[in-house]
């Protein structure tokens, strides 16, 4: 936090550069002491401070989960800020140059007091206002009563202010506030108040005649709007008379800018990257470039500042449509990706989806330069975010995994290597752990981060293995999953092992290779003790835990969950091979063990479930055996075996597949209940 | 922590082999008749350079060749190393080779005089210039001067001592180096180091005090309290430091010259009685170091009263005194250690000390007590202590030369007694120790023949002698008798002097050891069988902690290892009990009749096969029952619970290495193993497949399993249809089945497994002549090891990914529903967004406003507050004025 605060302060210092510069400029001209303006000065100071605080909060917000995996993100952040600001000053000079544009200056400052829906803050303001009035009166009375006091007050005021000043800003305490006061005073006079008429006029002008000076003015105002409240408003030369004006400017620029720039550059509506690149060398581009930059930068700042979901979605959708323009501004693109990834990881559903779509758009449109960066950043953010499991997190986790898979599937040539490296890293950790078997090493495996990572890659493989050659990835991931399952014996880790089985089943199903999983399930069959504890335990959901708490081990619910999960997983395994010629042999050992288990069970409900499973498997086994008896080919004849029962496979009227469907249905309803 | 021994830091002089006082050897020989060359008795001066035992003699000055390196070393020594006044004063300018020669002459002379010298005054002289071939000393000493903290880094020291392996290695290094180093040099350097350390310590102390003073002055608030406390601490620290110095001084003097300073042992012993635990521990550890170094290479026998009465020379008296003091102090020290072993805070140190002593001087007096304690601590609940004891015993067993094997026997007997006393509920480490025992197999066989030869020869000789004797005269005969008598005496003497014990004795000891070991093993097995009927006491905590049969595992391993040494008489009983232990209850439900784990049962089977193979190859006993066990155990095997390597081992010993198998049995195993590999992981599967392949190759009839032959049932004998759940391989009817499993296994994810399966399916694969090579190389255990997760992971982690084939890229969604995704964007309503922007603006504005108002409020209220101040000032002024007035008045 200390570090961040410092950084933020530094940032604010940079941010306030324009103010400081102005200060210096005006220093020589105004050296009068103006007590009455002191007040104003205070405002300026405090505003800058508030923005500083504001930013501080923001940056904390940004980095809190990112800090989990590396410090480098911090660095990136810092660089970005510097980048943006340095370029910003240059930009301003370009955009600010023209002022020969019609400007209507009939100021109609309306008081916002009539429409005070913002209860809390406005109320607060009102209270304070009343208090001020009271105090002022008191002071006045005192001054009247004791005239000498005013002199004393005057002499002490300077001290008072100074000490306060030091309190507020620790490393800017030495700034000459008196000069600053005069500056801001002057500044305020210089500011143009924008009213709705002006904006309307400018909008009209821009639409009619995009090349004209109105665009620059409008963009200036847009920038001011984006900076509003973020920067000190003394830094801007524009003030908004009205909230309507503010929103009008933002809405207009956001929704029209893309089209206008396209028109200016003379490219078709659907701005493709190729056409942008083509027009990069033309003179038009040179003219448009500063405007474009100003627009995009302002958008990003706004994106970084606004918290409301819908506004964000709107801005994102606009940015998405003009994503091709970002190709010209690498630093902005980097900043954009960072914001997007942050929103994607932390935002709520639709916002996250939206930001993911923009990331995907970048990956598609700016493929060659930014695909790698997108892959890395999203994966890192995912790792940082997948440390803990919260009950409501399931859907979000799914979404994150899905979107990463989507992103990685865009170009397998590149992404496969990344996936392989990541899997190798996981494998390294695992083999280290197997070697040492230390407790804290085991914890590295036995956590959600690790499991989520491996399940992410399993998902990726499952999605892509049908169309691509991912044999290496497949075998490595199977190896890792097997290793995980072997590392954690014992009943308590059953949920973790069942997760492994689930992943293996998925892999086997999608790739068509045979992965034996039965042995993962057997060990719980032996553990069956007569459960006497029938106390009402709420639930025992295997999907949300990796390790069962000790007190649940003997509970009825736990046994139920075990049996149901085991049956589900095993029938998934069997249903994949239900028409294979060696199904009878595959089911032999599981059947023997399940029969023994069935004999030992005493809970009637469970017995029924197990019995049903046994019956179904036996039925299928007998069916295959019957079909097999009439065959004449030998096990060596691969072609014949592959064609065995192909006809039946295509149809789904087999009793076992029906049974499997019902099992899945059951489990779904059970999850829904909990 | 406990092992704070400053004495470990400097090179410790080695044992007695370089003892400078020559009388001692002769005395030793005189008293005990076991050590030292005979001629020592005659000329005491000549033995100085002779080392007893297997240590090479100290380099004789005449043989010394001074190499270039030596000179260089000496030069360097004089230039950079000399920082002690004594050396400096004596050696400046004497770094040329000529000086060396002079020095050697001097040295020669000194050697001759040494006997008479009690205290050598010339030591330093000699030390400074004595050639040091290795340069080790210098190197070491420089390292030690680096800093004080390193010297007193207790923890490090303790750590160094804690790892016994390291310590031993270090000592052996030292020994090797030491053999070349003249002892005097070491002594002096030891002394010098010691002095330096002491100086440094004293120098350091004032600084500490100063800082403490500063600390005191900064905390003035509760100064009185602190001062008292700190003073107390300070004094304690000082006392501690002083005692350390004292300890070091005494230790040093002892090592420098044990003969004259032997009384110091008492002093050291006294330090061990200190109340301060740290000091006491330090004392204990220092004593270990001292004893390790000064204990002679023989046993000390105190002179009898009769001997005491005899008049002896001065040297002998001196040596007697020395030995008796040493022995009595050693005894007192051991008693102390044994007493402290009970004390929990000293337990670890005491055991460590005893382990070090037992390891270093197993030949010396009172070793029985040491062995007893160490063996007792084999069952310690403290892991460190247990490991230490195990390590000590192992080194005892492997280095039998140190104690002629007698201690081995003692230890083994003690362990077997311990097992008996604890009713087999002990830590498995106890039996692991046995595995490092070595038995000389030739001993039993070769010796008797030799004996016979010798006796034949003797007989012949006697006959000859007798025939010669007959015609001789009386005088001649007497002379002859005298000669034979002396010769016999001489022989007896030689025998007692020679280090190698008689083969007969060794054989006897070995057989005794063996019988003790097997007695222990059989006891454990018997116990396991008994306890399977009557469960052990439930209140026994150790049994719960250790599992039901903690000793069975190592016991079976041991039986497997020493199976070739088992006496034939025991064989029958052993097989019977193994059969019972491996026994399968027959019924799957209900409580099984014995509580052994699957791994243990498998181990029983393996041991049974090993025993049979090693001993009864000729008898050809069919081990049918064990096959039945294995057949059923395959179903009981669980990859997480049981040890896969044991299973692979069992497959290897019982099926892969076995002789020709019965057709039915082989077929049954083939079928079951194939089924087995469909359910279990790849290492198990591959081990099973290798075995299957082997069985199929050996049994041509079983190859019918690979063909779907409708007439295959003709071979199946009694059972026409295959019964997968049969518990007897003979009754399973496996010959009637087809190995369909292989077709699924050829789709296995693991390439080795799938290729093994498909190679069996292909017709060429089963051609015996072609696959012979493959068969002989890969055993089930090897196959299992190759495919363990660890190995595979290791392989995988080192591979590089190369995108092999063309991978196309697509722009479509893979997982998400594209329609749903696209809908999201159209959801946003612009009007709503506009409204939100307005709100946003208002919020920001209000925020600003709030900020401004707050400031104003603050300022105003501050002004009002100032008013109070103003009034106070006024009052003061007024008062001052009044005062002035009053003064003026």
Image (cartoon, coloured by chain):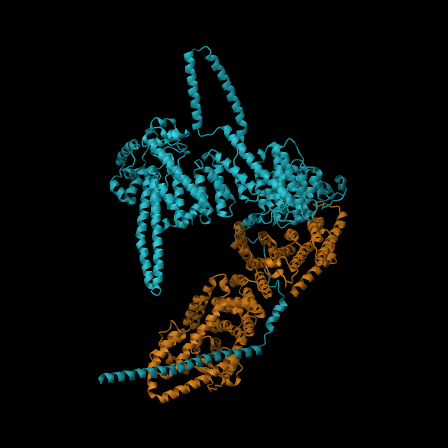
Chain colours: A orange, B cyan
Q: Residue furthest bottom?
A: A144
Above-or-below relation of A295 to B347: below
Q: Nearer the viewer, residue A427 or A414?
A: A427
| Drawn side of residue A483 relative to residue B387, left or right | right
Residue under the image location 50 percent in, 45 percent down: B386
Q: Nearer the viewer, residue B322 or B497?
A: B322
Res B417 seen here: yes
Res B48 seen here: no
**Which quadrant would the C terminus of chain B be assigned to in this image?**
bottom left
Above-or-below relation of B207 to B263: below
Q: Nearer the viewer, residue B592 or B833?
A: B592
Tell me where residue B420 appears, x and y as whole percent. Answer: 56, 40
Tell me where residue B805 appears, x and y as whole percent. Answer: 58, 54
Tell me where residue B712 appears, x and y as whole percent. Answer: 75, 41
Q: Nearer the viewer, residue B565 or B652?
A: B565
Q: Please identify the quarter of the rendering in which residue B630 is found.
A: top right
Residue under the image location 63 percent in, 32 percent down: B617
Tell me where residue B473 appears, x and y as whole percent. Answer: 43, 10
Q: Please identify the quarter of the rendering in which residue B579 is found.
A: top right
Number of numbered tags placed on the structure image: 0
Above-or-below relation of B402 to A291: above
| Drawn side of residue B666 relative to residue A83, left or right | right
Q: Residue furthest left?
A: B888
């Amino acid at each position: 936090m200390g570090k961040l605060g410092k950084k933020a302060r530094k940032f604010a210092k940079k941010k306030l550069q324009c103010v400081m510069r102005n200060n210096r400029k005006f220093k020589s001209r105004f050296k009068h002491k103006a007590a009455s303006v002191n007040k104003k000065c205070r405002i300026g100071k405090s505003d800058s401070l508030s923005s500083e605080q504001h930013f501080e909060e923001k940056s904390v917000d940004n980095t809190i989960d990112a800090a989990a995996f590396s410090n480098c993100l911090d660095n990136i952040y810092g660089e970005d800020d510097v980048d943006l600001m340095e370029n910003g000053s240059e930009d301003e000079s370009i955009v600010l140059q023209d002022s020969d544009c019609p400007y209507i200056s009939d100021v109609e400052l309306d008081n916002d007091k009539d429409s005070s829906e913002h209860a809390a803050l406005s109320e607060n303001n009102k209270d304070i206002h009343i208090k001020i009035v009271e105090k002022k009166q008191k002071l006045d009375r005192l001054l009247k009563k004791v005239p000498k006091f005013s002199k004393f007050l005057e002499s002490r005021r300077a001290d008072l202010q100074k000490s306060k000043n030091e309190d507020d800003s620790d490393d800017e305490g030495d700034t000459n506030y008196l000069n600053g006061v005069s500056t801001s005073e002057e500044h305020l006079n210089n500011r143009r108040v924008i009213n709705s008429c002006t904006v309307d006029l400018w909008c009209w002008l821009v639409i009619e005649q995009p090349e004209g000076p109105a665009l620059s003015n409008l963009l200036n105002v847009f920038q001011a709007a984006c900076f509003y409240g973020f920067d000190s408003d003394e830094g801007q030369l524009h003030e908004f008379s009205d909230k309507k004006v503010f929103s009008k400017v933002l809405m207009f620029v956001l929704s029209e800018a893309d089209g206008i720039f396209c028109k200016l550059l003379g490219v078709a509506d659907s701005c493709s990257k190729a056409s942008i690149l083509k027009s990069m060398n033309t003179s038009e581009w040179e003219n448009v470039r500063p405007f474009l930059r100003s627009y995009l930068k302002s958008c990003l700042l706004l994106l970084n500042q606004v918290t409301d979901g819908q506004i964000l979605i709107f801005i994102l959708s606009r940015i998405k449509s003009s994503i091709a323009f970002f190709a010209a501004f690498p630093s902005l693109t980097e900043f954009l990706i960072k914001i997007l990834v942050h929103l994607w990881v932390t935002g709520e559903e639709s916002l996250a989806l939206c930001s993911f779509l923009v990331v995907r758009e970048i990956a598609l449109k700016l493929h060659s330069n930014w695909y790698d960066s997108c892959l890395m950043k999203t994966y890192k953010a995912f790792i940082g975010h997948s440390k803990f499991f919260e009950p409501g997190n399931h859907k979000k986790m799914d979404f994150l995994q899905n979107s990463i898979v989507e992103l990685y599937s865009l170009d397998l040539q590149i992404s496969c290597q990344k996936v392989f490296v990541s899997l190798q890293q996981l494998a390294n950790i695992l083999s280290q752990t197997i070697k040492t078997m230390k407790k804290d090493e085991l914890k590295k495996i036995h956590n959600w981060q690790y499991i989520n990572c491996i399940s992410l890659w399993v998902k990726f493989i499952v999605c892509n293995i049908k169309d691509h050659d991912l044999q290496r990835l497949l075998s490595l991931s199977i190896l890792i999953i097997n290793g995980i399952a072997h590392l954690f014996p014992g009943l308590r880790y059953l949920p973790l092992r069942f997760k492994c089985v689930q992943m293996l089943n998925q892999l086997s199903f999608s790739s068509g290779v045979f992965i034996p999983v039965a042995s993962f399930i057997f060990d719980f069959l032996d553990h069956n003790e007569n459960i006497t504890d029938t106390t009402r335990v709420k639930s025992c959901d295997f999907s949300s835990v990796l390790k069962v708490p000790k007190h649940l081990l003997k509970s009825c619910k736990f046994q139920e969950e075990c049996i149901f999960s085991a049956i589900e997983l095993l029938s998934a395994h069997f249903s994949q091979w239900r028409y294979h010629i060696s199904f009878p042999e595959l089911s032999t050992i599981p059947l023997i063990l399940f029969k023994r288990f069935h004999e030992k069970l005493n809970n009637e409900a469970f017995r029924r479930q197990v019995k049903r499973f046994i019956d179904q498997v036996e039925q299928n086994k007998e069916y295959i055996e019957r079909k097999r008896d009439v065959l004449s080919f030998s096990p060596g004849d691969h072609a014949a075996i592959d064609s065995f029962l192909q006809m039946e496979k295509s149809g789904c009227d087999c009793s076992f597949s029906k049974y499997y469907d019902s099992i899945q249905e059951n489990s779904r309803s059970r999850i829904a209940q909990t | 922590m406990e092992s704070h021994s400053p004495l470990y830091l400097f090179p410790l002089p080695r044992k007695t082999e370089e003892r400078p006082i020559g009388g001692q050897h002769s005395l030793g020989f005189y008293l005990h008749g076991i050590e030292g060359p005979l001629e020592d008795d005659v000329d005491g001066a000549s033995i100085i350079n002779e080392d007893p035992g297997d240590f090479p003699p100290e380099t004789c000055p005449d043989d010394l060749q001074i190499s270039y390196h030596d000179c260089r070393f000496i030069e360097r020594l004089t230039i950079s190393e000399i920082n002690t006044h004594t050396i400096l004063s004596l050696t400046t300018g004497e770094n040329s080779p000529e000086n060396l020669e002079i020095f050697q002459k001097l040295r020669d002379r000194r050697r001759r005089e040494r006997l008479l010298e009690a205290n050598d005054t010339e030591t330093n002289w000699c030390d400074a210039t004595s050639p040091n071939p290795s340069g080790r000393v210098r190197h070491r000493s420089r390292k030690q001067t680096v800093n004080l903290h390193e010297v007193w880094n207790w923890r490090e020291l303790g750590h160094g001592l804690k790892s016994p392996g390291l310590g031993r290695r270090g000592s052996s290094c030292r020994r090797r180096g030491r053999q070349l180093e003249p002892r005097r040099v070491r002594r002096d350097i030891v002394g010098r180091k010691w002095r330096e350390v002491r100086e440094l310590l004293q120098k350091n102390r004032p600084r500490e005090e100063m800082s403490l003073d500063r600390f005191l002055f900064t905390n003035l608030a509760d100064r009185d309290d602190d001062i008292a406390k700190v003073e107390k601490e300070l004094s304690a620290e000082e006392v501690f430091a002083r005692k350390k110095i004292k300890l070091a001084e005494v230790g040093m003097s002892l090592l420098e010259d044990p003969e004259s300073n032997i009384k110091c042992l008492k002093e050291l012993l006294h330090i061990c009685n200190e109340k301060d635990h740290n000091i006491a521990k330090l004392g204990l550890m220092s004593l270990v170091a001292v004893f390790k170094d000064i204990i002679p290479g023989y046993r000390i026998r105190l002179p009898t009263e009769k001997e005491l009465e005899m008049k002896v020379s001065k040297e002998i008296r001196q040596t007697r005194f020395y030995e008796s003091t040493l022995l009595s102090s050693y005894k007192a020290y051991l008693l102390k250690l044994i007493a402290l072993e009970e004390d929990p805070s000293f337990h670890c140190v005491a055991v460590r000390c005893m382990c070090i002593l037992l390891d270093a001087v197993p030949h010396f007096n009172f070793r029985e007590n040491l062995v007893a304690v160490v063996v007792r601590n084999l069952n310690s609940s403290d892991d460190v202590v247990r490991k230490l004891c195990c390590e000590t015993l192992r080194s005892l067993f492997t280095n039998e030369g140190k104690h002629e094997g007698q201690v081995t026997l003692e230890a083994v007997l003690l362990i077997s007694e311990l097992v008996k006393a604890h009713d087999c509920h002990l830590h498995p480490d106890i039996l692991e120790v046995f595995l490092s025992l070595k038995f000389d197999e030739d001993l039993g066989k070769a010796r008797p023949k030799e004996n016979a030869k010798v006796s034949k020869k003797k007989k012949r000789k006697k006959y000859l002698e007798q025939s010669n004797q007959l015609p001789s005269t009386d005088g001649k005969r007497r002379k002859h008798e005298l000669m034979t008598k002396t010769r016999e005496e001489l022989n007896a003497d030689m025998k007692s002097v020679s280090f190698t014990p008689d083969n007969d004795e060794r054989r006897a000891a070995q057989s005794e050891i063996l019988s003790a070991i097997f007695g222990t093993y059989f006891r454990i097995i018997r116990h396991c069988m008994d306890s399977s009927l009557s469960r052990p006491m439930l209140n026994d905590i150790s049994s719960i902690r250790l599992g039901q049969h903690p000793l069975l595992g190592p016991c079976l391993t041991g039986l497997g290892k020493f199976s070739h040494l088992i006496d034939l008489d025991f064989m029958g009983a052993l097989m019977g009990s193994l059969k019972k232990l491996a026994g399968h209850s027959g019924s799957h439900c209900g409580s099984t009749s014995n509580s052994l784990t699957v791994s243990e049962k498998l181990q029983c089977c393996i041991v049974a096969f090993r025993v049979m193979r090693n001993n009864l190859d000729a008898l050809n006993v069919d081990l049918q029952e064990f096959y039945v066990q294995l057949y059923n155990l395959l179903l009981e095997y669980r990859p997480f619970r049981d040890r896969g390597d044991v299973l692979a081992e069992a497959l290897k010993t019982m099926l892969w290495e076995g002789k020709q198998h019965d057709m039915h049995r082989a077929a049954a195993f083939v079928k079951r193993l194939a089924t087995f590999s469909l359910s279990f992981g790849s290492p198990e599967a591959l081990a099973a497949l290798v075995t299957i392949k082997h069985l199929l190759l050996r049994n041509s009839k079983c190859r019918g399993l690979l063909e779907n032959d409708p007439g295959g049932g003709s071979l199946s004998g009694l059972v026409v249809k295959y019964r997968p759940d049969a518990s007897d391989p003979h009754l399973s009817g496996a010959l009637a089945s087809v190995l369909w499993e292989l077709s699924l296994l050829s789709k296995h994810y693991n390439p080795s497994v799938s290729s093994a399966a498909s190679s069996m399916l292909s017709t060429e694969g089963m051609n015996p002549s072609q696959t012979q090579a493959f068969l002989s190389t890969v055993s089930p255990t090897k196959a299992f090891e190759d495919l363990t997760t660890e190995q595979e992971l290791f392989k995988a982690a080192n591979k590089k990914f190369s995108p092999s084939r063309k991978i196309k890229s697509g722009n479509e969604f893979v997982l998400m529903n594209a329609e749903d995704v696209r809908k999201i964007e159209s959801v946003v309503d612009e009007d709503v967004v506009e409204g939100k922007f307005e709100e946003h603006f208002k919020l920001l504005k209000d925020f600003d406003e709030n900020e401004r108002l707050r400031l104003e409020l603050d300022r105003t209220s501050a002004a009002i507050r100032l008013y109070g101040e103003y009034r106070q000032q006024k009052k003061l002024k007024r008062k001052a004025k009044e005062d002035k007035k009053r003064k003026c008045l």
